[in-house]
Image (cartoon, helix red, strand yellow):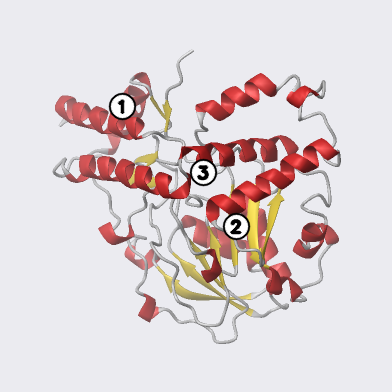
Amino acid sequence: MTRLYNFSAGPATLPEPVLRQAQAELLDWNGVGASIVEISHRSAEFIAVAAEAEADLRRLVGIPDDYAVLFLSGGATTQQALLALNFAAPGQVVDYVVTGHWGKTAIKQVKPYVSVNIAADGEPGGFRDIPPRDSWKLSPDAAYVHITANETIHGVEFRDAPEVGEVPLFADFSSSIASEPIDVSKYGLIYAGAQKNLGPVGVAVVVVRRDLLQRQGQPRADIFDYRSHVARDSMLNTPPTWNWYLAGLVFKWMLAEGGVAEFARRNAEKARIVYAAIDGSGSFYRNHVLPEARSRMNIPFFLPDETLDARFVAESKAAGLLALKGHKAVGGIRASLYNAMPVAGAQALADFMADFIRRNG
């Protein structure tokens, strides 16, 4: 069996050593005589797995003790709705900075519960940049300010946490968590679907400053209350145990490889290689994002003729490069370079791009 380079935006490529370990442990995990998928989430064995995964994630990302960590089902989109229910009063103003498709989606999830102020919007400029900080119209009484740290579809990324004053900053880090060091203390809450940098689809991570959990929020069922999940160590109901276990294996793999600092180095090199292939092609390949806002994780680009898109995707697949078709919202091509993608994968893509120009330019 040959594994190809998988550029999928999510569910995304996973580290081969992690997959092989999971494969070896699938029928009989840790000598218990059953798969980890089959044992109780309340068993001592799984509770130990969960606690170790949290400890490893704290070490990997640098999460302070005054932040709670949750492993939840529902993905990042569910968390987007829960932000308003847990941290804003009914109808209270919340500020959203929109830099792409997922920022717009985040607003859609909270509109039934709060008054949304779009503090800044990159859409009029085609989502090519992050609106300058001095142009943001923030509300002094907002419950929180929300950003999307990395836009998976449009390829726009915040390079640093913006200064928003005393109002807590909430951020969707689904596409960039653990891809480079971040100062968690600059955020009130971070959330991320695991299926890009942290593990498989089916589990989301929420990192929340504990004092924010004291907010009353809005009337909500217990299952939608972050405080209840914190009190039960993310086991208020049956959690996605397999996904949690696999994420824990990914954390260990990343730590063994050198941690976030090492992956920041690799990710910078991968992005450099692919952007150089785009920028060095004349006008054949085009990326519309301004250089200072370009994502390292998700690189969309466009060919001179849309009729070439299908040929590029088919031929790249034949060359061992998977899932390069762009999102339906924007079209074109997209390469996702998450932590599990090796530098060799980025170089293979750049080589294919150069060959494609020679044959089609």
Residue 271: horizontal and vertical position, in percent?
31, 45
Q: Residue at x 33, y 25 (%)?
A: 316
| Residue placed under numbered mark 1 in the picture | 311
Q: Residue furthest top?
A: 1
Q: Residue at x 77, y 59 (%)?
A: 230
Q: In what element is the residue under mark 1? A: helix
- The answer to whether residue 106 is left or right of residue 342 is right
Q: Residue 299: in sight, yes or no?
A: no
Disc 2 versus disc 1: distance between alpha carbons?
37 Å
Disc 2 versus disc 3: distance between alpha carbons?
13 Å
Look at label 1 and name its amino acid: Arg
Residue 335: horizontal and vertical position, in percent?
37, 39
Return the residue nearer the eye: 124 or 266. 266
| Residue placed under numbered mark 2 in the picture | 191
Q: In what element is the residue under mark 3? A: loop
Q: Earlier in the sequence, mark 2 or mark 3?
A: 2
| Residue placed under numbered mark 3 in the picture | 197
Look at label 2 and name its amino acid: Tyr
Residue 192: horizontal and vertical position, in percent?
58, 53
Q: Quadrant of the C terminus?
A: top left
Return the residue nearer the eye: 306 or 256. 256
Tell me the crowding category of disc 3: few under 14, some 14 to 19, or many 20 or more residues within 10 angstroms, Cα based.
Answer: many
Q: Residue at x 64, y 35 (%)?
A: 246
- The answer to whether residue 31 is left or right of residue 149 is right
